[in-house]
Amino acid sequence: MNCEKIQELLSPYIEDELSEERKQEVEKHLQGCASCRMLLVSLKEAREAMGAFPQLEVSERLMSQLYALPHRKKRFKFSFDFLLRPSLQPILAAATIILTLISFYFFNPNKAQIDKSINRQIHLGYSEIERLYAKAETLATNIGEYKNNILVSLLNLNPFGETEE
């Protein structure tokens, strides 16, 4: 094992929370690694120092007062901090681009030509849609003539190659 993994296991090792197999792995590593041994000694000293602190007893009166404190809900406080969230940055970037394009459109001296171009493109799109719709109607009419033949063919189609018994 490498030092990083052993260092993660040192605290459970001190607390005697490791399995025998893990414990032996840690001990084997500690025999060959001086820096991990020094860290183990430091952790043991810190544990002993923490154990030397006196334990304070909290009075029943203080505990009852703490439990009696009403739980206050957070009130809504308006601020612009929510705009700084990283999750909103792509949305704000897109909004900036859209607003820039809109401002270019409204403040462009050739706005009338832009309107004509947009109008022409819309009408070209509508005429293309009408042409496709007419082709679809023709196709539906032609298929309607062969409806019975198509249904019989589909019913006789055996996609899995199974034989009927």
Image: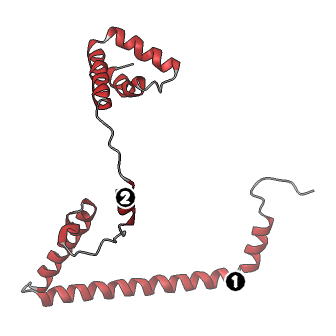
* 60 relative position to 165: left or right: left
Give the image location of residue 121, x and y in percent: 28, 83
- The amino acid on which the numbered mark 2 sits, given as a three-letter code, is Arg
- Identify the residue at horizontal 29%, vertical 18% (top origin): 41
Residue corresponding to mark 2:
61
Residue that protrudes farthest toward the left in the picture: 109
Q: Earlier in the sequence, mark 1 or mark 2?
A: 2
Mark carried by residue 145:
1
Give the image location of residue 132, x and y in percent: 47, 82
* 57 relative position to 96: left or right: right
Give the image location of residue 128, x and y in percent: 40, 83
- The amino acid on which the numbered mark 1 sits, given as a three-letter code, is Glu
Displayed quadrant of residue 122: bottom left
* 14 relative position to 134: left or right: left
Give the image location of residue 14, x and y in percent: 39, 23
Number of callouts: 2
